Image (cartoon, rainbow, N blue to C red):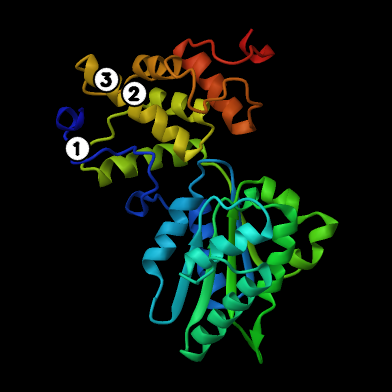
Amino acid sequence: MYLKHFGLKEKPFSLIPDPDYLYFSPRHSGAFTMLEYGLLEQNGITVITGDVGAGKTTLVRLLLKRINYDELTVGVVNNAHGSFGDLLEWIATAFDITYEGLSRVGLYRNVQSFLIDEFSKGKRVVLIIDEAQNVEEKALEELRLISNINADKNQLVQIILVGQPELLSVLRKPTLRQLAQRVSSEYHLEALGCRETAAYIGHRLRVAGADRLLFDQAAIMLIYYYSAGIPRLINTLCDYALVLAFGSNAKEISLEIALAAIEGKNIGGIDRHRKPSQELERVRLALNKGWGLRIGPTSSEEQ
């Protein structure tokens, strides 16, 4: 509804993961490099973690766009959960392997046969499990059985586990040490900093066709503070701010409009009581001193 008003060709802050809009911050570049390294070096298991909305799924979608499918057969399991039997069925579905009516042993045999057949065709198999923190501990441990399927010195399947920080806690458990020892590459995707948030907003606006930033400095700082640099939350606040600006016939998102967007978000993942990092605290102090706001707890520096 606001595209023509701001001279945009499409929505810049959609919540749908879109690799065309991916902003390669140093953090995202590092995570993607680790994904590519895991494939290139034929590592057994690669683990990528990050907070909800950090951009993990977008990175996976970009990887899927760049993969050479002449050499690799890729299966993706989204939102897996439950027992190993359930996970095996999800894996079979990802690779179009028959599983109806089979016992767990029979299903495992079919998966094994599929991996061997693909290897005989000169293709490596990559299994990507997104939201892997939802997989039960027992299922994760038994996932090791699949990673053990080898042909001479060749590993028939590479596994990429993508999940929220809880996945790290699970993999550190003593009961999963054998699986953890097979993790060759890992990366934790941190949130964006304030300058990166500004660059991120500018990047998405340019991709969407904007010829200017649209958000003033204070508005960006405020959005950074309340999103804590999480890309999905940045998108939520920026999109709502554009709607409010359109409604008031404003051509730029000012601090006042950004404040209204934040005040209007009672749900949507905005945490007004999170413990701030050093950078978040510096931004909060700057907003309070420079623009006369009163956000967050008052410190001795502001008295």
Can you say whether 100 is above or below 249 in the image? Answer: below
Q: Which residue is mark 2?
A: 241
Q: Which residue is mark 3?
A: 245
- The span from disc 2 to disc 3 (Cα, nearest Å) is 6 Å
Q: Amino acid at mark 2?
A: Ala
Q: Secondary structure at mark 3?
A: helix
Can you say whether 209 is above or below 125 in the image? Answer: above
Image coords of residue 109 (percent x, y): 63, 78
Q: Which mark is residue 243?
A: none
Mark 1 surroundings within 10 Å by alpha-carbon count, few (fewer than 14), some (14 through 19), many (20 or more): some
Q: Of 126 and 247, which appears nearest the observer? A: 126
Mark 2 surroundings within 10 Å by alpha-carbon count, few (fewer than 14), some (14 through 19), many (20 or more): many
Q: Amino acid at mark 1?
A: Leu
Q: Of 112 and 269, which appears nearest the observer? A: 112
Q: Which residue is mark 1?
A: 8
Q: Are marks 2 and 3 in contact (CB under 8 Å)?
A: yes
Image coords of residue 179 (percent x, y): 74, 66
